Amino acid sequence: MSLIDVQNLTVRMGGNTILSGVNFRMDQGEIVTIVGPNGSGKSTLLKAIVGALRPNAGKVVRQSGLRIGYVPQKLHIDPTLPLTVGRFMNLPRHVSDAAAQDALDEAGAGALSDRQMADLSGGQFQRVMLARALLSKPHLLILDEATQGLDQPGSAAFYRQIEQVRSDMGCAVLMVSHELHVVMAASDRVICLNGHVCCQGAPEQVASAPEYRALFGSGTQGALALYRHEHTHSHDEACAHDHAHDHSHDHEAAE
Ligand SMILES: Nc1ncnc2c1ncn2[C@@H]1O[C@H](COP(=O)(O)OP(=O)(O)OP(=O)(O)O)[C@@H](O)[C@H]1O
């Protein structure tokens, strides 16, 4: 059974249809990225998946007992508030020092425990947010534009950390990003959303799909190739855990 199965999801808000007839599934261990223009419904889809929003039609079927870890787009912490990373990891629930340290290590933030949250760089802050999301040992990690504000090397390093987490913990990852060239290279599958699923499939497939090019142009293909070339893991390795699920809808144009 899939971790999540989004079936014919339709969401209307303020008299507008934000999402209509969205279908997709996620299997264990997959990294899936949702891309789409501003206002295309990406955050709305994530909210429906975590259960924060009730769809007008269709449903999200979650595997029974599914644990979701969520890394938000931004979290504002009052910079005058004295709060160490170690204490932050204990909010809202107390966790053992060992569990907190394990999660920080896994997120590449192992040396930050005694630092003040207010003093962290953008990349360090997001790693701490990732660590906190890992405390529940999630089956599915959801990231909503988690690298916003990071520079390109910072984003690339963050996404490599995500790949590491996936390979260590075996969790699936669903993320939303605007950084097409970086994030597409780190994904097994890309879903291009514009109120509906325009196209989906492997990054190269989507980057060359007419529906995708109509939205984003064709510039990403070159950047994707460059990133693949520089990437330390081989593409074959990244795809070694190929998914058994049906890709017959890949490239399907919804209109
Ligand atoms: N509570 C709401 N009431 C009415 N309209 C809403 C509400 N929340 C979101 N919308 C509208 O739904 C549309 C999709 O918003 P959403 O935040 O899901 O898009 P997005 O793809 O995540 O955008 P971005 O890339 O800019 O973050 C937008 O037009 C937004 O104005």
Image (tube, rainbow, N blue to C red):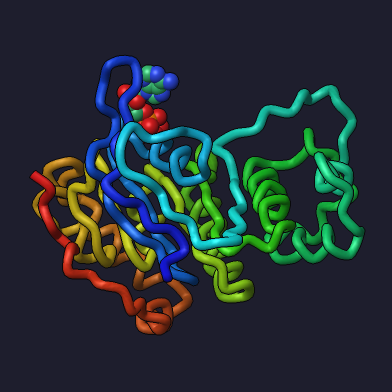
Of 131 and 80, nearer the camera is: 131
User: Taking 214 as reference, is 57 left or right?
Assistant: right
Of 139 and 72, nearer the camera is: 139
Quick check: which quadrant has ligand 1?
A: top left
Question: Residue drawn 79% across and 61% down?
Answer: 110
Of 202 and 12, nearer the camera is: 12
Q: Is residue 175 above or below residue 172?
A: above
Q: Is residue 99 above or below residue 69?
A: below
Residue 105, picture quadrant: bottom right
Picture coordinates of residue 129, whole percent (x, y): 68, 47
Residue 186, picture quadrant: bottom left
On-image quarter of the C terminus: top left
Of 171 and 119, nearer the camera is: 171
Question: Residue drawn 20% across and 50% down?
Answer: 219
User: Taking 215 as reference, is 79 left or right?
Assistant: right
Question: Residue drawn 37% across and 78% down?
Answer: 239
User: Taking 51 as reference, is 37 left or right?
Assistant: left
Residue 194, picture quadrant: top left
- Residue 182 visible at all: no
Picture coordinates of residue 157, whole percent (x, y): 55, 59
Total marks in image: 0
Picture coordinates of residue 160, whole percent (x, y): 53, 64
Q: Is residue 236 above or below residue 120?
A: below
Picture coordinates of residue 223, whole percent (x, y): 29, 58
On-image quarter of the N terminus: bottom left
User: Taking 170 as reference, is 4 left or right?
Assistant: left
Question: Residue drawn 78% across and 33% down?
Answer: 118
- Residue 124 visible at all: yes
